[in-house]
Image (cartoon, coloured by chain):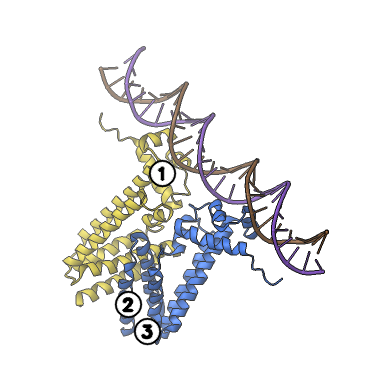
Chain colours: A yellow, B blue, C brown, D purple
DNA sequence: GCGACAGTAGACAGATCTGTCCATTGCGTC
DNA sequence: GACGCAATGGACAGATCTGTCTACTGTCGC
């Protein structure tokens, strides 16, 4: 066994990633997913066990990709202030991608029941972002890193919603300006 | 006819308002709505014609209520700067209500198909809020009222999402602080 | 009393969804 | 060539959802 890497699983995840994100978790049935993946229904249930588990893996994949994207942007930035703002640069780059439709966790949560898999994975991601912002705020010398992180997170959320609801990715520029304004006000005071 | 005011219609709207908001449009079936309203299924279809139309009326009611709440807060405020910030006071008051679960338009849009009734009503509401913020920004003497309105709208959206996703209404305070920061920076420059 | 009418209760049709099951097929390993 | 195993294709069960339709009932103006 040279790690066959089960292409069925990969194709299912790719199909779920595209369809669930573009049309919503509820609106896309299992049949659509397996058709797009070119896979039998039994393969889906053998691999993941349930639709809910597939949704969870889809969101975990999104989370992982987002973390890597943001981390890379932060590490590429020079200096503590730039590292803090790099989170918004990463977000702006995301907005510019064709087919971006807002935060997948917000979208999935709107359809999910409280306490379920979706909420769990979403909470994980949100806690990670917030902890990262807090850490970067502390590194930048903010007097109250928690408060600054919270303000920046409001902006981060607002940007994702604006893109989704208004279907207008041009919001990225005001976002970065506002982020800089908030950061500089916190570092000054 | 002394305007019987068809109580069936009112009870249906009240039931839809509670259930759709608390659990989501997709998750709540027609049967749940008519059961809560204490009304026959035929009454629903005679009155509204379809579930989609009922959802539209539910959102229109939310829109109307929000407009009135915000308008009242703005009119009660003294001076142009306070009027601009009053929008966020109204939002904070909303957050403090028990059972608040974030913006109903964001929630409904996440489940709806593009171009449908939900998107239409949501777009109406968002355009109204943005126009209001722009007008208030102009009255306050902002050099670029559009830009200030856009920044404030980012904050407004972020606050609604944070409350929904983190289930934490205490975000209202940072929101108001940040709003004041943004407004003062714009009026100063 | 009576007709008009709004509303009720619930069966029913038709679609769609998740999840199960089974017989079959293709492929790599010995 | 034979075996094991993952994957296939599709029928099927069972639930649920929207929307229709019929027969019945209570009320109000005349």
How many C-alpha atoms fall within 10 Å of the one at disc 2: few (<14), some, or many (≥20)? many
**Left or right: A161 in relation to B128:** left
Residue in the picture at 49% in, 74% down: B67
Q: Which mark is residue B129?
A: none
User: Circle 2 is placed at which residue position?
Assistant: B182
User: Circle 1 is placed at which residue position?
Assistant: A15
Residue A48 appears anywhere in the view: yes
Chain letter of the residue carrying label 1: A
As rendered, which of A123 and B140 lies closer to the eye?
A123
Where is residue A73? Give x, y as percent: 25, 59
Q: Quadrant of the N terminus of chain A?
A: top left
* Element assignment for label 1: helix
Where is residue A68? Give x, y as percent: 26, 53
Disc 1, disc 3: CB below 8 Å? no
Q: Which mark is residue B81?
A: 3
**Left or right: B84 in relation to D25:** left
In space, the residues marked 2 and 1 are separated at their CA atoms by 42 Å
Residue in the picture at 38% in, 53% down: A114
In space, the residues marked 2 and 3 are separated at their CA atoms by 11 Å
Q: Mark 2 and mark 1, same subunit?
A: no
Where is residue B95? Give x, y as percent: 38, 68
């Amino acid at each position: 066994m040279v790690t066959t890497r089960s292409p069925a699983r990969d194709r299912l995840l790719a199909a779920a990633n595209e369809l669930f994100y573009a049309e919503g978790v509820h609106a896309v049935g299992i049949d659509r997913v397996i058709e797009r993946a070119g896979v039998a229904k039994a393969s889906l249930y053998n691999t993941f066990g349930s639709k809910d588990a597939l949704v969870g893996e889809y969101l975990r994949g999104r989370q992982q990709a987002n973390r890597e994207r943001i981390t890379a942007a932060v590490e590429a930035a020079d200096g503590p202030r730039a590292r803090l703002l790099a989170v918004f640069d990463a977000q702006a780059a995301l907005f510019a991608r064709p087919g971006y439709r807002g935060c997948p966790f917000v979208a999935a949560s709107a359809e999910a029941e409280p306490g379920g898999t979706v909420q769990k994975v979403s909470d994980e991601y949100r806690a990670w972002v917030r902890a990262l912002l807090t850490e970067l705020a502390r590194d930048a010398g903010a007097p109250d890193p928690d408060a600054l992180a919270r303000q920046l997170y409001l902006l981060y959320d607002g940007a994702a919603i604006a893109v989704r609801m208004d279907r207008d990715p041009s919001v990225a520029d005001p976002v970065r300006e506002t982020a800089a304004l908030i950061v500089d006000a916190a570092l000054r005071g």
